[in-house]
Image: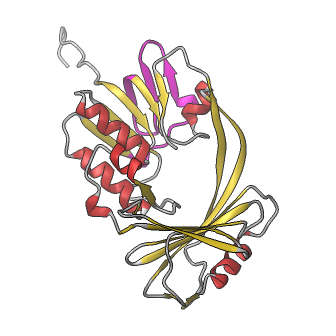
Amino acid sequence: MKGGDMMPARKIWDVAIIGAGPGGSNAAAAALQDGLSVVQIERFKFPRQKPCAGGITNKGLRSLQCNVVPVIRSNWSVFEYNLWGDRGSMFTFGSTVLSMVVRPEFDNHLVRENLCRNNFTFFDGERVSREGIHYDGLFQIVTPKRTVLARQLIGADGANGVVNRLFRITHIQKYAYAAEVNLTRDVAHSEKPLNPCMDLFAVPRGYGWVFPKNDQWSVGLYTFARGINLKQELLSYLHAKGFSVTGDPLATFEAHAIPVGGWRVAIPPVPVYVVGD
């Protein structure tokens, strides 16, 4: 650089979003539609794996800012809420009440849609720590590869993510636990047709679920109980629901803790927000 030349100005985005799940990507789409510039940072490389049953209600679909029809795997107008080992309740509606997606595909689709818009930048495979977020009139977000500057910050990295923990917006009171497998129809068979369902008390202090798609079933358990063997419980549930599987039925097993709470909200003194379910 020659003497007298000025240093080029660093880019400042209107909004920085940490996390690239549906909440973060939908927030990005809404901001882009209002003419804001957006940078989204995700710790995992996309497309990423994400345990999730993959059911979207009509209200959820209406809230989305982009077309997701290309990644909907099935639509359902029937849903079952069953009391495990006692009785079943099947509800039939005149139109679709639940649409099914596969989360890795769904998340990736939302990001791709945003990448077609102006003023959107996406960085994946870049982790942000609590120590990497600073505010002095602008947010400075440090990843292993770069420093991002933004006027506003949205935390879409989960209730236990770095944004919520740093700014203490919501209070997590306890944790539940979920375990899931995705059984493709080329290796799994069901004794009878299965509707989307929740089976209350199929696991202690929790429920089981089956969410069918056109080419697979998402089958899982959700529980507040601690000290139980989720793998064994899930195997028992698969057997009770009439599944037979070629090979290891737990080959796609995923388990994770789910923060519960968040209804007590503290408004931070800086322009930071959280989104998600």
- The reply, left or right, for residue 270 in relation to residue 201 is left
Asked if one can make out residue 20 in the rendered structure from this viewpoint, the answer is no
Q: Residue 241, image x and y in percent?
A: 61, 81
Whether 51 is drawn above or below 238: the answer is above
Colour logic: secondary structure
- What residue range appears in magenta? 124-151
Residue located 70% across and 80% down the image: 236
Q: Is residue 73 visible?
A: yes
Quadrant location of the N terminus?
A: top left
Residue nearest the observer in this picture, 130 or 206: 206
- Magenta span has 125? yes
The percent position of residue 152, horizontal first and vertical second, equals: 40, 23
Outermost residue toward the right in this view: 227
| Figure quadrant of residue 41 | top left
Image position, residue 75 (x, y; %): 36, 67
Q: Nearer the viewer, residue 43 or 223?
A: 223
Up/down of 80 relative to 13, above or below? below
238 left or right of 4 in image: right
Residue 110 in the image: above or below residue 13: below
The front one of 66 and 20 is 66
Q: How many marks?
A: 0
Q: Nearer the viewer, residue 26 or 247?
A: 26
Q: Residue 30 colored magenta?
A: no
Residue sitting at x 24%, y 45%? 115
- The image position of residue 216, as x and y in percent, is 44, 77
Taking 204 as reference, is 269 above or below it?
Answer: above
